[in-house]
Amino acid sequence: MHGTIVFSDGTPAKELAGGAVELDSLEQPISARGSIDAEGKFVISTYEAEDGAVPGKHRVLIVSRQSTGDEVVGKVIESKYQRFETSGLELEVTPGTNTPTFTVERAKSRR
């Protein structure tokens, strides 16, 4: 499963590069994850690299790249996207090709 994250104005969320997308199945005790690249795109893996997610409904969260060492990473998207309970993002995975696009809001204040 390949997907894209965009901001509400439709531009790719390139600032999320190094972050991750995580899917949590609502029907099975399993989750899937993918890293976000420099174009705001991601590939989901569950059991092995790029194998996608199990079919069914999923909650979705998106996390920004974390600060490392002396580097400080500013807030890119609203904090609500970092928790399944508050992201408001869901995905129905069907057998075959899935290419979701998630639209997120930029952080109102960058710290």
Image (cartoon, rainbow, N blue to C red):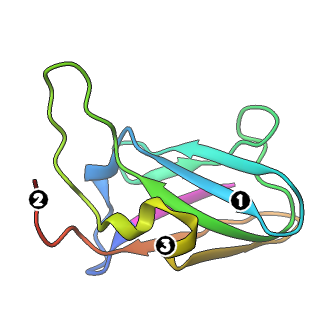
Which residue type does callout 2 highlight?
Arg
Q: Earlier in the sequence, mark 2 or mark 1?
A: 1
Q: Quadrant of the N terminus?
A: bottom right
Q: Which residues are magenta?
A: 1-5
Q: Residues within 10 Å of mark 2 (few under 14, many from 20)?
A: few
Residue on which disc 1 sits: 24
Residue on which disc 2 sits: 110
Q: In which quarter of the view is residue 28 placed?
A: bottom right
Residue on which disc 3 sits: 87
- Residue that appears at 32% across and 60% down: 13
- Residue that appears at 15% across and 73% down: 108
Q: Nearer the viewer, residue 47 or 50?
A: 47
Magenta region includes residue 77: no
Q: Which percent across, then down, holds residue 83?
A: 50, 62
Question: Overall secondary structure of the magenta stretch?
Answer: strand
Whole-number angstrom distance, CA of label 2 to CA of label 1: 28 Å
Q: Residue furthest top?
A: 69
Q: Residues within 10 Å of mark 3 (few under 14, many from 20)?
A: some
Which residue type does callout 3 highlight?
Ser
Asked if marks 2 and 1 touch (Cβ < 8 Å), the reply is no
